[in-house]
Image (cartoon, grey):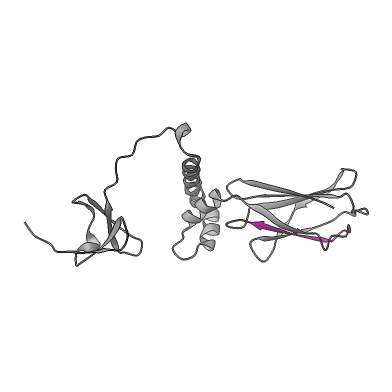
């Protein structure tokens, strides 16, 4: 039998860091502790997890269900080379395309400012749209109803310089701005839809 001395540094309430010549190759269990490796190569030990009871879908907290759905979406998204590249481009530090996809699923988009300063009812006017999301949303669409409730034009906005900014360029004249309704919708890659209406 070989006796090995290791140093254990307590740096968290329920987790200890293990150091020593052989610690980086340790895995498995020892004295009620389970060893695992962090992404930065350091070895940590924590208490052996207790067996979990299986819970039916309809008995799970909604947060658990959402995370499971997010994980399934992240697996699908990272199998798509185009989507994986989009998520990877937004990842920083220890983030990965997979973790960015999970965050994107868990946080639906929100339509922020809709700038109508340049909209005077003329063809070629610009309407600026800000959409807050983890990454750039898949599309932003806009429709304009006149004072009589008739849709006079609709179409997709173009992405701007930042991933949150979009611009819609009008093509139809609207001589009476008062009573006009602007409908804006945005959808992210997981399929969450955000909508907003602005009445002039």
The N terminus - image quarter: bottom left
Could you say where residue 3 lies in the image, as x and y percent from the top left?
9, 60
Depth order, front residue of 76/164: 164
- Give the residues drawn in magenta, as a range: 118-134
Q: Residue at x 90, y 43 (%)?
A: 148
Q: Residue at x 30, y 40 (%)?
A: 51
- Taking the image as shown, residue 30 lies to the left or right of residue 12, namely left
- Taking the image as shown, residue 153 lies to the left or right of residue 45, namely right
Is residue 183 in the magenta section?
A: no
Q: Residue at x 49, y 65 (%)?
A: 92
Is residue 130 in the magenta section?
A: yes
Could you say where residue 107 lies in the image, as x and y percent from the top left?
57, 51
Q: Residue at x 19, y 67 (%)?
A: 21
- Farthest-out residue, right: 175
Could you say where residue 57 lies in the image, as x and y percent from the top left?
46, 34
- Taking the image as shown, residue 179 lies to the left or right of residue 183, namely right
- When the figure is inspected, residue 19 is found, relative to residue 35, above or below; the finding is below
């Amino acid at each position: 039998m070989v006796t090995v001395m290791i140093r254990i540094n307590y740096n968290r309430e329920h987790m200890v860091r293990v150091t020593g010549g052989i610690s980086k190759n340790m895995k498995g269990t020892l004295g009620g502790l389970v060893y695992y490796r962090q992404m930065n190569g350091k070895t940590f030990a924590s208490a052996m997890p207790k067996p979990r009871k299986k819970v039916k879908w309809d008995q799970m907290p909604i947060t658990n269900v959402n995370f499971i759905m997010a994980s399934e979406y992240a697996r699908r998204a990272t199998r798509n080379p185009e989507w994986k590249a989009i998520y990877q481009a937004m990842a920083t530090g220890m983030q990965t395309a997979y973790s960015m996809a999970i965050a994107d699923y868990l946080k639906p988009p929100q339509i922020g400012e809709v700038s109508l300063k340049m909209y005077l009812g003329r063809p070629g006017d610009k309407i600026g749209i800000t959409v807050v999301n983890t990454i750039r949303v898949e599309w932003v669409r806009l429709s304009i109803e006149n004072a009589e409730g008739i849709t006079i034009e609709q179409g997709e906005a173009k992405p701007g310089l930042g991933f949150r900014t979009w611009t819609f360029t009008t093509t139809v004249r609207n001589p009476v701005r008062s009573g006009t309704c602007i409908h804006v919708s945005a959808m992210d890659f997981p399929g969450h839809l955000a909508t907003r209406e602005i009445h002039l």
